[in-house]
Amino acid sequence: MSALDEQQFGFVQVAIPTPLHQLFDYRWRGNQPVIAGTRVKVPFGRRSVVGIVVQGMAESAYPANKLRAITEVLDEEALLPKDVMSVLLWASRYYHHPIGDVLCSALPVLLRQGKPATLEHREIFNLVADSDALIPSAKKAALQHSVYTVLAEAGNQAIDASTFAAMSPRWRSAVKPLIERGLVKAGTSMVLPRNDAVESGPELMPAQESAVSAITEKLGQFAPFLLHGVTGSGKTEVYLRAIEPVLARQQQVLILVPEIALTPQLMRRFQRRITGCLVSLHSAMNNTERMQNWLLAAKGHADVVIGTRSAVLVPMPRLGLVVIDEEHDGSLKQQDGFRYHARDLAMVRARDRACPVVLGTATPSFETLNNVASERYTELALTMRAGVATPPKMALLDIRRRPLIEGMSDRLFDEIKKHLDAGNQALVFINRRGFAPTLLCNDCGACADCRRCDAHMTVHARRARLRCHHCGSERPVPQTCESCGSESLDRIGYGTERIAAALAEAFPDIEIARIDRDSTRRKGALQAQLDAATSGSAKLLVGTQMLAKGHHFPGVTLVCILDADRGLFGTDFRALEQMGQLIIQVAGRAGREEKQGSVLIQTRNPDNPMMQTLVSEGYAEFAKIALDERRLALLPPYAFVALVRAEAPNADAPMHFLRGVSDRLLNPPVAGVSVLGPVPAPMERLGGRYRAQLLLQAERRSLLNEALSRLTINLDTLKDAQRNRWSIDVDPVDLF
């Protein structure tokens, strides 16, 4: 605790999770020191809420008799230390999001609710005396004798209560007399997961060695690296080798991954290689597990933390290295509430803590490529696959004027059969789940639409349900048209369920693993499917982007990509970039061992120059051309954008509100900032609410920040503000 922390103050400013862009003044209690980053209970309106102390004050701008007092101080030390508080305060300004919401979002749910910030402890027992006269008789007190024997054999080592519980449900009645006689001492010990490495790594290739050396030479200073490695080039091995000297320096490592599905797989690999305390953090954990792992990291016990985007906000007092796997992935951007990008916050944390940060990917985001070109990041290239594996051969499969069998060409079936007959696996990728995306009436042309969204309902055949993939509403598949009553209904389009059914009919003796959000909802289902894919028992794999990145399926020699053309005609300016990244990532699942891999991309646009470039010249040339187009259009990363979004149950309210926002921005205008809109969102109605958006575009970041800062002042006073739910999205990853 610094001298400043120990000063006595009469007032404090507290961050409270509200939509208001301000801190709240309270009277401090007694002579306790004010410690920024601690939780307090405060009265707020008619409620008692948990807030976070930001700073103490000798005086307040408000009369003391008008201020309410702190009710309770919940922590003796800061849960959010100075370095994390600094990043969060910066993030609140950068993303123009209410400070209370930002600070509280950094805490696990239970800590936000005011639960004690204490780590789990377990009961332990030690033998403290050894007297033959006190040893229980094996005949008269058999359980006591067994307990004593276990403790005696352990010597000075404490025995966990779970050991005795496994011996008998009556273990406590056996231990109690031993404690009373002074033979045994009871106590508690913190539950600290400990992992011991069981294997060593393979010999590094020269490019991997160079990458590891470059990273480790910069330990102790801020240094951003792009680890640009083709799929299967051994990026994870570089992470592991770079981590070793960090742990030897008694420092911590933060590893961010975009998907929950990747976390357990990465965790198992790290557990085989690293000795120390490893913890994971992701939304699939229950609240208690999440809080315990968060506290292990925050108190410095965890050596390696592997988590999804929210893990970037976890305090780590010994932080020495940050790794962001699949840095291009849009899942690293929070899409509601506090709309931060974990990659960008990780950069700020690494800079403040003076440690290297490694961005790993086979398909770098255009922002990262621009930072490399501007020499802000150092590129570490891995151009060859690890071991004897070679890059897969990619080809476009023209399906114009060809008959399709459930969305797949006859040639595709022939290729799948060829690879299966050779004892290999094949992966069929379609980024759409369900059976069919549309239920269409042949008589009147009506589609089964969602009643709450501007979207068609997806047919899920196995459950005979229509489901909206945007709001989650569902209803039974109708037997007749809901508009005209006709029984002539067709299921139009293809999803993973339909593709898997077609493949099962074509290859009845082949086990198929379907991996998407529907097939992996039950606990353990995802792991079971991945195990079947990895072991090779499932010869045919069908899935969405859950299969696209990070997975190593050694037996897959053929990847078939369906419906690849969607990205060519997307309304979002990032659609082309995302299409290229997805195709390369999925293609990377093929031929990762000694056998040559093949990739077939079904397309109705085989002559498209961007598709041709991607397949024949690779992602780097594809990105170069697309970046040149972005530069000419003054789009990110050559300009800076923010979206002001609004939604309301009334169709007119969002547009009226955003017109007022536009007027405020344009009167007087901020030089160098363009205001485009407002316009309805590409999907105007979502979940029963109507949405509109306003785009701000600037050539300089400072100009955009100036405009947004001016906007957020008294924005709630605008006409229609109370009738809308509005938000500001800085650096949006999509315009949807």
Image (tube, rainbow, N blue to C red):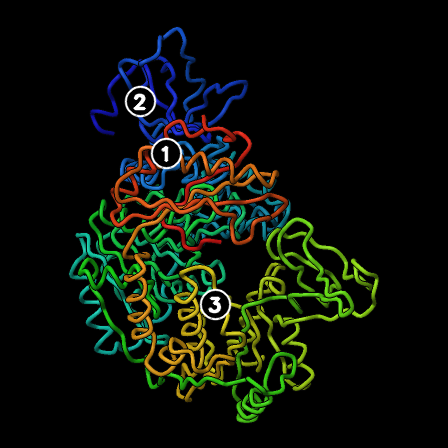
- Residue, x 15% and y 61% (percent of image)? 217
Query: CB atoms at circles 1 and 3 under 8 Å apart?
Result: no
Disc 2 on helix, strand or loop? loop
- Given the image, on which type of amino acid does mark 3 rest? Phe
Q: What's the distance in space between the residues labelled 2 and 3, CA to CA? A: 56 Å
Q: Nearer the viewer, residue 549 or 489?
A: 489
- Is 595 situated left or right of 138 in this image? left
The residue drawn where x is 35% and y is 83% is 616
**Does 658 sit left or right of 34 as displayed?**
right
In the displayed structure, 10 sits above or below 493; it is: above
Label 2, label 1: how far apart the Cα atoms are: 33 Å
Across and down, in percent, residue 352 comes to 23, 44
Where residue 298 sits, quadrant-wise, is top left
* Screen quadrant of the N terminus: top left
Which numbered dot is residue 34?
2
| Amino acid at pointer 1 | Leu
Q: Secondary structure at mark 3?
A: helix
Q: Residue at x 31, y 54 (%)?
A: 253
Secondary structure type for disc 1: helix
Q: Of callouts 2 and 1, which one flags the residue occurring earlier in the amino acid sequence?
A: 2
- Mark 3, Cα crowd under 10 Å, few <14 / some 14-19 / many 20+, is few
Q: Position of residue 665 (x, y in %)?
A: 36, 36
**Where residue 508 appears, x then y in whole percent?**
68, 85
Upstream in sequence: badge 2 or badge 3: 2
Q: Which residue is mark 3?
A: 569
Q: Is residue 186 visible to the viewer in this orientation of the structure?
A: no
Q: Residue at 41% of width from left, 31% of height from top?
A: 100
Residue 725 visible somewhere in the drawing: yes
Q: Residue under circle 1?
A: 711
Where residue 126 appears, as percent x and y from the top left, is 44, 44
| Above or below 33: residue 281 | below
| Neighbours of disc 2 within 10 Å: few (<14), some (14-19), many (20+) | many
